[in-house]
Image: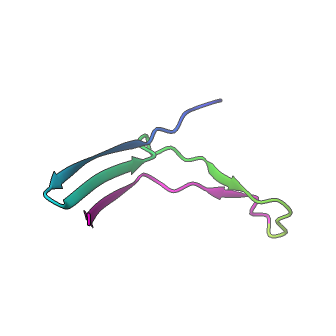
Amino acid sequence: DAFSVVNLFGGFSQQRGRWRFTEFVRLDNVGDRNYAGSVIVNETNARFYEPSPQRNMSVGVQAALQF
């Protein structure tokens, strides 16, 4: 049966004088589905399918000074 994998991403940026700050957050595999992340062609060890990562999250911050 077909199914969908949902990922969420959000972020914002701020300007303070010559500085620009950007923040983001990302949530992958929101439903925590188990599925084949990739298929290996010509695999001889009987591991044709690699599982996808479970639910995970990334958070980041960037600062830039404009000249």
User: In x, y percent, where is residue 35?
Assistant: 60, 47
15 or 60, nearer to the observer: 15
Which residue is rendered at x = 55% and y = 47% of the image?
34
Q: Which residue lies furthest to the left in this view?
A: 17
Residue 2 sits in quarter: top right
Vertical arrangement, residue 47 with respect to residue 25, above or below: below
62 or 64, nearer to the observer: 64
Q: Is residue 20 left or right of residue 26?
A: left
User: In x, y percent, where is residue 53?
Assistant: 51, 56
Magenta region: 46-67
Q: Is 30 one of the magenta-colored residues?
A: no
Q: In this view, does 9 lie to the left or right of 17?
A: right
Vertical arrangement, residue 3 with respect to residue 47, above or below: above
Quadrant of the drawing holding the N terminus: top right
Vertical arrangement, residue 50 with respect to residue 30, above or below: below
39 or 17, nearer to the observer: 17
Q: In this view, does 8 lie to the left or right of 20?
A: right
Q: How many labels does the image show?
A: 0
Which residue is rendered at x = 80% and y = 70% of the image?
45
Quadrant of the drawing holding the C terminus: bottom left
User: Coloring scheme of the render?
Assistant: rainbow
Q: Residue furthest bottom?
A: 45
Residue 58 sits in quarter: bottom left
Which residue is rendered at x = 29% and y = 63% of the image?
62
User: In x, y percent, where is residue 9?
Assistant: 37, 44
Q: Is residue 19 left or right of residue 33?
A: left
Residue 61 sits in quarter: bottom left
Q: Is 63 one of the magenta-colored residues?
A: yes
Q: Which residue lies furthest to the front in this view?
A: 67
Which residue is rendered at x = 31% and y = 58% of the image?
59
